[in-house]
Amino acid sequence: MHGKIAVDAVLSNVREYLEQNGFEVVDPEKNLGHAKIVITSGLDKNYLGDESIKTEVPVIDASGLTEDQVLAEVERRLNISH
C-alpha cells in the first residue's frame, strides 16, 4: 500500500484506478488529515468562488486528466518509481 489519497467522490473512476494501483482512497470530507495528497474535480468552489483547500499536502486538480495522468502525478509527488 502506497498511502492514503483523498479523492472527490465525483471522481469514481480515479478512485477505483488508484485503489487498483495500491493506494488507499479516502473521502476528503472526512479524512483529509490522514491523506498524503488531495485530488479534486476542479469543481470545488464555495458560493463566493473560493477554490482554496486548507491542507498542508499537495492538491491535484484532476479536471481534464486521464486516470493514468492522475496516477503519474500522484507517483511523481510521492516520489514513487517503478
Image (cartoon, helix red, strand yellow):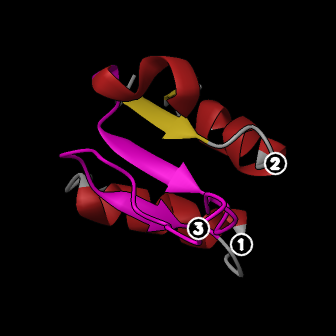
Q: Where does residue 67 sit, x and y in percent of width and height?
A: 69, 62
Mark 1, residue position:
66
Disc number for residue 51 = none
Q: Position of residue 57 (x, y in %)?
A: 23, 47
Question: Which marked residue is nearer to the observer: mark 3 or mark 2?
Answer: 3
Residue marked by disc 3: 48
Secondary-structure class at tag 1: loop
Which quadrant of the structure image shows residue 59?
bottom left
Q: State the separation of the CA atoms marked 1 and 3.
A: 29 Å
Name the residue type under label 2. Answer: Asn
Query: Label 2: which residue?
Result: 13
**Crowdedness of circle 1 by 10 Å Cα count: few (<14), some, many (20+)?**
few
Q: Earlier in the sequence, mark 1 or mark 3?
A: 3
Q: Is residue 22 magenta?
A: no
The magenta segment is 34-62
Whether tag 2 and tag 1 are in contact, CB under 8 A, the answer is: no
Nearest to N terminus: mark 3 or mark 2: 2
State the SS at label 2.
Answer: helix
- Does residue 36 show up? yes
Task: Name the image quarter holding residue 82.
Answer: bottom left
Residue drawn at the location 62% of the way across and 59% of the way down = 44
**Helix, strand or loop under label 3:** loop
Quarter of the image holding residue 69? bottom right
Residue 26 in view of the camera: no
- Inspect the image, locate mark 3, and give the three-letter code of the amino acid beneath it: Leu
Q: CA distance from mark 2 to mark 1?
A: 9 Å
User: Considering depth in this image, is 54 or 33 the residue closer to the camera?
Assistant: 54
- Of residues 30 and 73, which is closer to you in this image? 30
Q: Is residue 79 left or right of residue 76?
A: left
Q: Residue at x 49, y 67 (%)?
A: 51
Specify the farthest residue to the bottom: 64
Distance from the alpha carbon under mark 3 to that under mark 2: 29 Å
